[in-house]
């Protein structure tokens, strides 16, 4: 309802009231018809103006209150939610109030759903963390108890058990480091510090560092033959971590005596980097969830290979922190290709 039609309604109601009053005055009057008509005319005019003024002021008071209500509801809604409001699209206060309340209720519903999801995520995350930490802690406890129960004097096991306990401590440190990295990335605490560097040289560096692990499984790490320089603008330290995680995964889940190939493609304003292996591959149904924290395709293999289930989640956070994208393509039994982009300079 627009302001114009509201005014017409006020005039019509006032006219109706004035007519009713004039009719009553005429019916109760005993004078001549001409006097009655003059008096009725006056009565009509006075009652019309009075009703109109009364209704107009009542309308002003009521709508001022409604305006106040609209403003209060608006204040409940956060700045980011406000642009979605339909309220501003109408001049009528009642419709405005109705729209504002509906939009507010909608926001609250979305907020409750978001909080419920966060609560589920929090519980899942805590469950996963304690589950991950339990195994190395119980292992350490087992070795220490055995050593205390006389194992310390037994030359055949004492050093071996201490070395095993040390391995479990290493595992805990890896888990905690990954947890710390992911929480820093998720809270935005960790700033991306970009610089210009040669991505090919960095990949070469990573391959050299991982060569021992790869050779232990008979896997060859290869880079393009014509290793020419390719400059990108990114956080060198973080991108190193991305390459390490992808190369280490290709070795962990690659087939023995297989190959991991790193390739670079010039894609206009970006450089696309590919890490491809000819290993186990990943079934199609796992691909959409692969970058989630603690998501593993083969849990026992991942743990056996020292995986925390956080590597790909960290990788995704880092790449998205650079406003770039990462993709995965995989065929079971054939191999997996991870590709991500970086800004070219
Ligand atoms: P993890 O520490 O378990 O390796 P990631 O987050 O790095 O955790 O990887 C998640 C899961 O994705 C792994 O457990 C593994 O099942 C699967 N995966 C990752 N990379 C590969 C790959 N190159 N080939 C096959 N499976 C892979």
Image: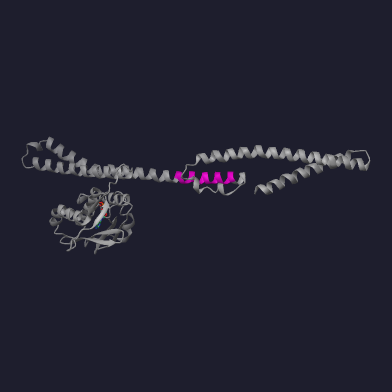
Q: Is residue 154 magenta?
A: no
83 vs 152: above or below: below
Query: Number of labelled discs?
Result: 0
| Front-most of residues 285 and 275 | 275
Query: Residue, x 21% and y 41% (percent of image)?
Result: 138
Q: In the image, ligand 1 is in what quadrant?
A: bottom left
Query: Residue, x 66% and y 47% (percent of image)?
Result: 3
| Front-most of residues 154 and 172 | 172
As drawn, is 111 to the left or to the right of 315? right
Measured as percent of width and height from the top left, residue 112 is found at 45, 43
User: Which residue ends up furthest to the front in the rendered image?
Assistant: 345
What is the quadrant of residue 220 in the picture?
Answer: bottom left
Q: Is residue 106 magenta?
A: yes
What is the quadrant of residue 21 in the picture?
Answer: top right
Measured as percent of width and height from the top left, residue 247 is found at 21, 55
Dominant SS type (magenta): helix
Query: Residue, x 27% and y 44% (percent of image)?
Result: 181
User: Which residue ends up furthest to the right in the rendered image?
Assistant: 32
| Front-most of residues 263 and 49 | 49
As drawn, is 109 to the left or to the right of 145? right
Span colored in magenta? 96-112
Measured as percent of width and height from the top left, residue 309 is found at 26, 49
330 vs 2: above or below: below
**Image quarter (top left, top right, bottom left or bottom right) of the C terminus:** bottom left
What is the quadrant of residue 146 in the picture?
Answer: top left
């Amino acid at each position: 309802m627009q302001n114009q039609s509201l005014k017409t309604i006020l005039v019509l109601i006032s006219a109706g009231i004035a007519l009713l009053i004039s009719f009553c005055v005429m019916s109760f009057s005993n004078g001549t018809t001409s006097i009655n008509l003059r008096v009725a005319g006056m009565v009509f005019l006075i009652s019309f103006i009075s009703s109109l003024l009364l209704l107009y002021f009542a309308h002003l008071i009521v709508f001022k209150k409604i305006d106040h209500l609209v403003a209060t509801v608006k204040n409940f809604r956060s700045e980011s939610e406000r642009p979605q409001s339909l309220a501003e699209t109408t001049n009528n206060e009642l419709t405005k109030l109705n729209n504002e309340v509906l939009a507010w209720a909608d926001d609250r519903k979305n907020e409750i759903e978001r909080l419920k999801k966060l609560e589920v995520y929090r519980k899942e995350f805590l469950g996963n963390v304690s589950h991950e930490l339990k195994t190395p802690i119980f292992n350490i406890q087992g070795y220490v108890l055995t050593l205390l129960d006389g194992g310390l004097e037994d030359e055949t096991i004492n050093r071996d058990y201490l070395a095993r306990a040390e391995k479990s401590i290493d595992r805990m440190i890896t888990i905690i480091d990954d947890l710390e990295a992911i929480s820093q990335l998720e809270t935005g605490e960790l700033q991306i510090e970009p610089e210009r560097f040669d991505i090919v040289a960095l990949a070469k560096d990573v391959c050299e560092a991982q060569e021992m692990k790869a050779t232990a499984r008979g896997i060859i790490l290869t880079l393009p033959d014509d290793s020419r320089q390719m400059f990108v603008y990114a956080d060198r330290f973080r991108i190193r971590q991305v390459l390490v995680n992808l190369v280490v995964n290709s070795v962990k889940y690659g087939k023995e005596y297989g190959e991991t190939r790193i390739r670079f493609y010039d894609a206009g304003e970006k450089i696309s980097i590919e890490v491809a292996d000819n290993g186990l591959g990943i079934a199609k149904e796992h691909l959409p969830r692969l970058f989630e924290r603690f998501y593993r395709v083969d849990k026992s293999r991942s743990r056996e290979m020292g995986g925390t289930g956080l590597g790909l989640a960290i990788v995704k956070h880092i790449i998205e922190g650079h406003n770039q994208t990462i993709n995965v393509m995989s065929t079971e039994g054939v191999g997996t290709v991870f590709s991500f982009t970086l800004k070219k300079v």
